[in-house]
């Protein structure tokens, strides 16, 4: 009877620890994936260049030269 009790405790605590690890892992994985990060990765070079020009990060001359380099 003591063996069954010991096995039950081992399975109980092992399951509880596994559940806690899974919960922490899933919480950190979802916080690392922000929509802005995935959207930036999906953009191609031309769209990024257009956005930088629209935000005023580069001049028209720089935009034209970079666009020629891309295409």
Image (tube, helix red, strand yellow):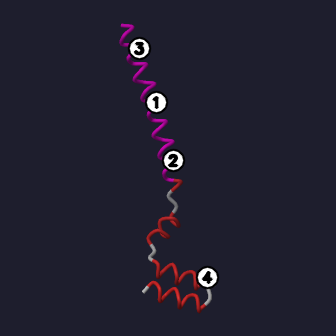
Residue 57: quarter of image: bottom right
Q: Disc number at residue 27?
A: 2
Local crowd size for mark 1, using a 10 Å CA cut-off: few (<14), some (14–19), many (≥20): few
Q: Which residue carries the number 1 mark?
A: 16
Local crowd size for mark 2, using a 10 Å CA cut-off: few (<14), some (14–19), many (≥20): few
Query: What residue is drawn where x is 55% and y is 81%?
Result: 51
Q: Which residue carries the number 4 mark?
A: 55
Task: Work out whether residue 8 or residue 32 is closer to the camera in this orientation and state it.
Answer: 32
Query: Does the magenta portion include 11?
Result: yes
From this view, report whether residue 46 is shown above or below residue 23.
below
Mark 4 to mark 1 CA distance (whole Å) = 50 Å
Query: What residue is drawn where x is 51% and y is 47%?
Result: 27
On the image, the x and y values in percent for residue 46 come to 46, 82
Q: Nearer the viewer, mark 4 or mark 2?
A: 4
Mark 2 to mark 3 CA distance (whole Å) = 32 Å
Dot 4 or dot 1, earlier in sequence = 1
Local crowd size for mark 3, using a 10 Å CA cut-off: few (<14), some (14–19), many (≥20): few
Q: Disc number at residue 6?
A: 3
Dot 2 or dot 3, earlier in sequence = 3
**Magenta part of the protein: which range?**
1-30
């Amino acid at each position: 009877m003591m063996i069954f009790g010991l096995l039950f405790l081992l399975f109980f605590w092992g399951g509880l620890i596994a559940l806690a690890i899974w919960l922490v892992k899933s919480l950190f994985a979802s916080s690392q994936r922000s929509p802005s990060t995935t959207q930036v990765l999906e953009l191609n070079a031309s769209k990024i260049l257009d956005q930088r020009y629209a935000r005023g990060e580069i001049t028209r001359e720089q935009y034209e030269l970079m666009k020629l380099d891309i295409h």
